Image (cartoon, rainbow, N blue to C red):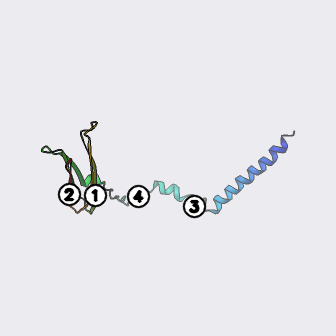
Amino acid sequence: MDILFLLIPLSVVLAVAIGVAFWMAVDSGQFDDLEAPAIRVLADDDTPAKKKKPKLNIDDCASFTQLDREEEDGVDFAIASSCEVKLACGIKWTLVCAPGTKQSKKTRGAVAFELDTGGSDGATASAGT
């Protein structure tokens, strides 16, 4: 019998919460037009869907090459662009000669440049520079 002192107020609070949720739905226009959504599903959509312009990835219009130099210890880096916009590029490198020995030598470098459509540029990393 003591449980009724808990269940009755709890059911009243639940009924009030449901009533408030229903009132908010009616007030926001949720039940204003019940027929149009059912007809809209069956209607034939004659307008063609707009084609979204695909986003271009930088990999689609720019290329990076790295070539080892045979006559000296070094590497040639090159970037070429066929993008329709100007690109701001940068190359950063660390060249290690004789790694793991006492004569190990590290050379670091970086270069930054801009590329127009159809342009290319690059840099050379060698142990002497």
Q: Is residue 48 left or right of residue 38?
A: left
Residue on which the image places disc 4: 45
- Answer with mark 4 or mark 3, whichever residue precedes in sequence: 3
Marks 1 and 3 close (CB-CB < 8 Å): no
Picture coordinates of residue 50 (x, y %)?
36, 60
Residue on which the image places disc 1: 89
Marks 4 and 1 close (CB-CB < 8 Å): no
Picture coordinates of residue 106 (x, y %)?
27, 45
User: Which element carries disc 3, helix, strand or loop?
Assistant: loop
Q: Nearer the viewer, residue 108 or 119?
A: 108
Between marks 1 and 3, how big is the CA–CA gap?
57 Å
Residue on which the image places disc 3: 33
Between marks 1 and 2, how big is the CA–CA gap?
9 Å
Q: Is residue 62 left or right of residue 4?
A: left
Most distant residue in the front direction: 102
Type of amino acid under label 2: Asp
Q: Quadrant of residue 82?
A: bottom left
Other-residue count near label 4 (Cα within 10 Å), few / some / many at <14 / 14–19 / ≥20: few
Q: Report the mark closest to the observer, 2 or 4.
A: 2
Type of amino acid under label 3: Asp
Q: Quadrant of residue 72?
A: top left
Type of amino acid under label 4: Asp
Most distant residue in the right direction: 1
